[in-house]
Image (tube, rainbow, N blue to C red):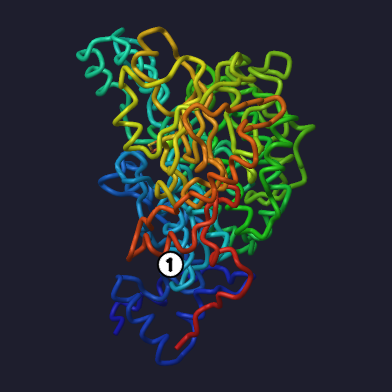
Amino acid sequence: MNNLNLENSTPMPDPVPVPLRSDRWFGPSDLRSFGHRSRAAQLGLGRGDYHGKPVVAIVNTWSDLNPCHGHLRARAEDVKRGVWQAGGWPVELPVLSLAENFQKPTTMLYRNLLAMEVEELLRSYPVDGAVLLGGCDKTAPGLVMGATSVDLPALFMPAGPMLKGNYRGRVLGSGSDVWKSWDELRAGRITEAEWREMEEGIARSPGTCMTMGTASTMAALIEAMGLSLPRSSSVPAMDAEHPRVAAEAGRRAVELIREDLRPSKILGPDAFANAAVALMALGGSTNAVIHLVAMAARAGVEFTLDDVDRASREVPVLCNLRPSGEHLMEDFHFAGGLPALLERLRPLLKTDAPTITGKSLGENIAGTQVHNDDVIRTPETALADSGGVAVLRGNLAPDGAVIKASAMDPAKRRHRGPAVVFEDYADLVARLDDPDLPATADSVLVLKNAGPQGGPGMPEWGMLPLPKKLLEAGVRDMVRVSDARMSGTSYGTCVLHVAPESFVGGPLALVQTGDIIELDVPARRLHLDVPDDELARRREAWQPPKPRFQRGYGAMFSAHIQQADRGCDFDFLVQPGENPEPAMH
Ligand code: FES
Ligand code: MG
């Protein structure tokens, strides 16, 4: 009973032009709907609070063990403010929090689980649309994959980069400067005390890695795809602009629902073509290749490694950010961010592509200016004319491999050298610093059994550490080949994502120490110089390793995970067919 008669005292919002999905729960005068309305009352809401209002799910990936998302519990309140203002009903729904920095063996094992959770959560609850709140590496593609499959109006609100790192007045970049300093420590050039001091200076606030790592790359690509507010991908997490943008995301989500603007209307082939252009211009993370292929498959768009490589041949690397360049995300933001970068690349873009603003990408970026030509370069002063992330093929990677050509020693672009093979990561750890390891600066370090099945989950082991004796001799880059991924903040001549992976019997499984491997980045070639009959003999003798999991999520993962060139999604999540709306009884 409603003693205060709140229903009549609360002004009702204007009727919405499209029927609300949530009205199927709250609207009818039947037994089930009585239950839903009485439970809304239990939440403290009168009919006037929600009747006729779009329900916006704030899908929140906050957790106490996710420092990149540490501010998102508070930030959800800013999104809610925007949703209420625009006449919606915000509901915060927590989902799996993937913290790259803590979760073992790798968050990549769980990206698809997050995507499944997002899809089923939105499908099964009375929501009309969503704001996807997150940012750490696998979180962004996981959120987008789930929202794409359920196809409710949604936009992505990035967590934003953390403050710049600082050590004795020197600016430090997430990941990139850790790897560099670790090599210096192992080479005896810095002390243990200095290394300890960096530990407390490199991650100074909540927010995602502030280099052009996977988090920054994915936020930028999702913006380029049209799924987030223009220039939102680089707003620093701790800047007062961040809650302002969060509120705007909430307001816009309500309008998206009223306009029935769903991912399926935004994520066409042009969205992914534009994302590939952005990836190259950013000198972005190699991980983005896997996520782009996976997100496209969810959207039903044909997008392959060939599309990635086409962009890599056409697009100059303009963004001077670590690990490919020098600056950090805050510099990129104040230089104009993604819209300013894209405006410089306008001739390469599909500018008619629709976006969540209701305008085209071309309209969104029109007239944006670059405020710092060193951070966002011109084609004339580009870091590289092409080849941000290149796709390689050859008898060692028949289904493809990738390399971040913008963040490697240019002298290694064409290289021929003998393999030093590690059978798995434990073998690498055990033997890497053995003074008798048969490695020289010209060797090719090979790591097996680190792919989607073998890792398992394709851990970020692909930037293999260099043998200590070579570091001490001054070597800082070597050719490395694996079926692993590497962190978006990593660098070096690392051939990654070799497909098919060694664990399932890909040619990588057949490499032996001493075999000659040829890398030719300009020709996009990765070749194992061993005669075919010898490879056939080795294949005969090859024994498949024993399965990584017998039960649980891992067993499902192993049974359904696709290879890297297919985006590492589960086969049953991309196969055609219906996943119907739930029945209302
Ligand atoms: Fe979370 Fe880098 S560890 S974004
Ligand atoms: Mg990372």
Tell me the quadrant of ligand 1.
Answer: top left
Would residue 402 be visible to someone looking at this image? Answer: yes
**Left or right, residue 550 beside residue 158:** left
Where is residue 72? Give x, y as percent.
36, 46
Where is residue 448? Give x, y as percent.
45, 40
Residue 156's place in the image compared with 508, above or below, is below
Q: Find disc 1 in the rendering and name its residue.
A: 121
Which residue is drawn at the image coordinates 33% and 49% (left, top)? 62
Which residue is drawn at the image coordinates 36% and 39% (left, top)? 68
Which residue is drawn at the image coordinates 40% and 34% (left, top)? 422
Where is residue 145? Give x, y as percent.
54, 56
Residue sitting nearer the eye, 377 or 523: 523
Query: Could you tell me which quadrant the C terminus lies in?
Result: bottom left
Give the secondary structure at mark 1. Answer: helix
Which amino acid, by three-letter code, is at mark 1? Leu
Would residue 229 be visible to someone looking at this image? Answer: no
Where is residue 300? Give x, y as percent.
67, 60
Residue 90's place in the image compared with 159, above or below, is below
Residue sitting nearer the eye, 473 or 68: 473
Query: Could you tell me which quadrant the N terminus lies in?
Result: bottom left
**Left or right, residue 444 beside residue 566:** left
